[in-house]
Each structure stands twice: as C-alpha cells, then as structure tokens.
Amino acid sequence: MAAVNRKWSFVVAANRLPVRRVWEGDTARWVPSPGGLVSALRPVMSGNPDAVWAGWTGVPGPGAEPFEVDGFQCHPVSVSQGELQLFYEGFSNATLWPLFHDALVPPEYHRTWWDAYRTVNQRYAATVADLAAPSATVWIHDYHLLLVPGLLRTARPDLRIGFFLHIPFPARELYIRLPWRAAIIDGLLGADLIGLQTQLGADNFRRAAARVTGAKIIGKTIHHEGRATRVDAIPIGIDTGRIARLAADPAVQARATEIRHTLGSPGTVLLGVDRLDYTKGIDARLRAFKELLSEGRLSAEDCIMVQIAEPSRSQVTGYAEVRNSVEQLVGDVNGNFGVMGRPVVHYLHQSQPIEELVAMYQMADVMLVTPLRDGMNLVAKEYVASRADNTGVLVLSEFTGAAQELKTAELINPHDIEGLKTAMEAAVHRSDDEAGVAMKAMRRVVRTNTAQRWAEGFLTRLEACR
Ligand code: G6P
C-alpha cells in the first residue's frame, strides 16, 4: 500500500494510471495495463520504493486511496463525470486530439471544455506538487496534461520536470488556430525537457513556441522568460523482449497455426490491428482491398483480411462515424466477395490480449498499418518483433512516427488509394528473399530502440538539463 502523505523522488503523471480494472463475477481487481508506456516505465518504477504514478483510474468519481499493483505505486487523481465529458471527451479528445492529428475531423473549441481542462490540470499539478520530495524528478505524459509543467514550475521551482508528447505536434499553421495557444505553450515551457516522437514534431513545437510567445530558439533549446527548455525527438520503443518471448512460446505458435486454419488456410493473410479511431486509416485500407478484389488483382479465394478494431472513445465526435463507415465497408466486401462460411474480411470490434495479438502477428503475411497521422504506432513495431524468422511484409504509412525508423517497410501515402493498392498487391507477391532483407533491417531497429532504452534515454537527458 502506498503511504498517504509520503514524498517521492520520482513522480510520473499521466491521464491514466498504469492499471485497469478487471471483473471476475462481482469482484473487481486491478491488473497492470498492457500499454507501451507501462512496459517502458516498469524497469524504473516497478519495485522502486521512491517512485509513484499519479493518474486517473478510468472510473469517474471521487479519487480512491493510493494503492499498489505489481510493484507500481498508484496515486489516483479524481475526475468527475462532468469532467470526463468536458476535459477527457471534450478538450482532450475533441479539441487537442483532432487538431494535433492534422484536423482530420474539425477540432471543436468550447470555453467550457477549456475551463474543465484547466481545472483538471491544476488538480494534477497540485497532486504532483504534494507528492514530490525536494528536488524530485517528475515526468509528465501526453496531451491531457499540457498545462501541468508550467503550473508545477510555479508551485515547485526546485523540481526537475520532463514532459513527453506521445502524439504528433502539428504544423504551426494548424496549431495557431487554437484559441488557448499561448497558455498551452507557456504550460509546456515549464518543463526542462520536452520529448517528441519525431524531428518534425520537435521542429513544429519550436516554431510554434517562437511564433506564439516570441521565445528565442538556440539550437534545440527554447529560451523564454529566463528559463531554458530543451526540445528533442526521443522516439518511443516497445518491450521487444516480451514480444519476442511470446513469439517463441509454443502455445502462441500453436495458436497462430490454429487461427490460420480457422480462416480456411488461405494463401495470404493481411492483418490490421488498431484502436477504432479515424486517424488510423482503417477505411482506406478496406477500400483498397475491395478495389483490388474487384479488379481481380487479388483473389478472394487466396487472400483473407483480418481487422481487429479495439473499441475506443465511443462518445467522442468522429468515432461513431468511423465505426459505421468501417462496418459498412466490411459488409460490402463480404457481401460481394465472400462465400457461405468464408468471409473475406474477418472483423472483430473487440480488444485482444497480447498473447492473441502476437499469434495474429505470427500468422499474418502482410501487416497493414495505414494511419493518416500517428505519433508513433507501436503495432508496426510489435509485428516486426514477432517475426523471428524474418518473414512477413509491413505496409506502413509514411505519416506515422514509426516510418522514421522502419525505413525498409513498404512505405505508403494512405491518401493515395492507387499507391496503397499497388503497395498491398506488391506486398502479397513479395519474394521471401526481398521480404527477409527488409525485415532483418527493421528487426535491428526494434531490438535497439526498446521501450526501456527510451525511458532511460529520456531520463538521462533530463538529468543533464539543469
Ligand atoms: C493514445 C494516447 C494515449 C492514450 C491511448 C488510448 O495512444 O497517446 O495517451 O492513453 O491513445 O486512449 P484512451 O483515450 O483510451 O486513453
């Protein structure tokens, strides 16, 4: 049990705690979340007696008492039902998320959402200020908490503050539409180090900061009001070891064979695994697949597509629409090209445990990762980490952070449907030799830049900042 009132020398703050609730009958218990951030921080947090994680439990209402799960000390921050709508669904996911993803759906600007965003960020800052020991290191994560570094700097000038943005930072021309653009830049500039997924994101941020606040940029550092903030591209990795261990597990391998058999042992399986989000380009890939079948360039007897779409943010603008469009396309392809007992697209609107995902990665010949915009995309990296025999082709959108590292993937522009079709067709017919060379190079990348190295790298740079 994490003690109330104690002080910690390392504090992480993120919108979500590293745990989720699972129900067994009528009893609920906390288990560690599967996400990339949790694996990245496990080595520096789990079992560390000086580290605590502040965040939301995912359940609206008054905050629970601090607790411990799997070595993670968790300090819940409360978010009320009203704040869930205004702060989480509203400002975070219907203003910032679309704006930072190139306004793929129009961002909405509401003053009530902004007020709630400020209130929740103030609560986080006050919580962290209270938890942090003198001169502690604090690491704040993602777009839900953009104001926290600045608020915290004012309350606790002694702290060393790092911030990492997991999503893209948009072009300055887009960013400056935000009515609260200056407050957000000021909030971020409370940090000593800001990490972004790509060089482009880091450049965009520096340019926006200079335009909005008149800050001076010298090299990678922003100088503003007597403070310096270093801005670096520090791309996140995955827990490669864990994925590799699962891929080597005979039970997972047997499951891969079984899935393929269940699909009717087709010549080629194409796979998509995404949160059901309009940024992921799921509809574009289904449309491309449908046209390839109509034009006879791929055959429904030979090629099967599997699409896992994890339910996500169903109350937020744009999500119900993308679900409708994806499900219509699935119906359309199956109606036109399926035969009794054998659909061409197998679609699951369900989340899957990691063991099942790795089995799917292993049985898929072609992995389709086609977002219109994505900060990193860890699925692309997990697919690569699962392909120990160097087989398989990754079709990857150039608008993902992952494309900056996985340069030998089959890179595509998801807006260019003809280009996407050509790449998908080529991927299906790629020779093992060619695929092997590309996969080997990508596997070197995911072995080198792991989640753990990312966390260590960030913290080492943060140490060096002040
Ligand atoms: C993205 C964000 C994360 C977020 C995740 C799931 O990866 O960068 O901060 O936790 O999506 O979204 P959710 O809204 O369910 O937390």
Image (spheres, grey):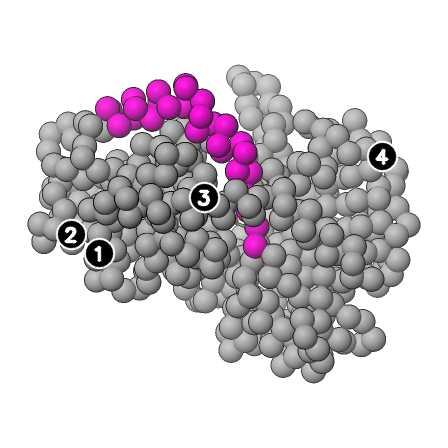
Which dot, 4 or 3, sits closer to the camera?
3
Q: Secondary structure at mark 3?
A: helix
Q: Is residue 338 left or right of residue 277?
A: left
Q: Quick one: which residue is furthest to the left in this view?
A: 296
Q: Secondary structure at mark 2?
A: helix
Q: Is residue 375 left or right of residue 54?
A: left
* Label number found at residue 443: 3
Residue drawn at 30 percent across, 36 percent down: 364
| Location of residue 400 with respect to 1 vertically, above or below | below
Q: Amino acid at mark 1?
A: Lys
Q: Quadrant of the N terminus?
A: top right
Q: Secondary structure at mark 4?
A: loop
Which of the two discs, 1 and 3, labels the residue nearer the N terminus? Answer: 1
Mark 3 surroundings within 10 Å by alpha-carbon count, few (fewer than 14), some (14 through 19), many (20 or more) = many
Does the residue at mark 2 contact the one at mark 3 (Cβ under 8 Å)?
no
Is there any visible trace of residue 414 in the rendered image?
yes
| Location of residue 224 with respect to 76 vertically, above or below | below
Which of the two discs, 4 and 2, labels the residue nearer the N terminus? Answer: 4
Residue drawn at 54 percent across, 62 percent down: 198
Residue 33: x and y in percent read 58, 34
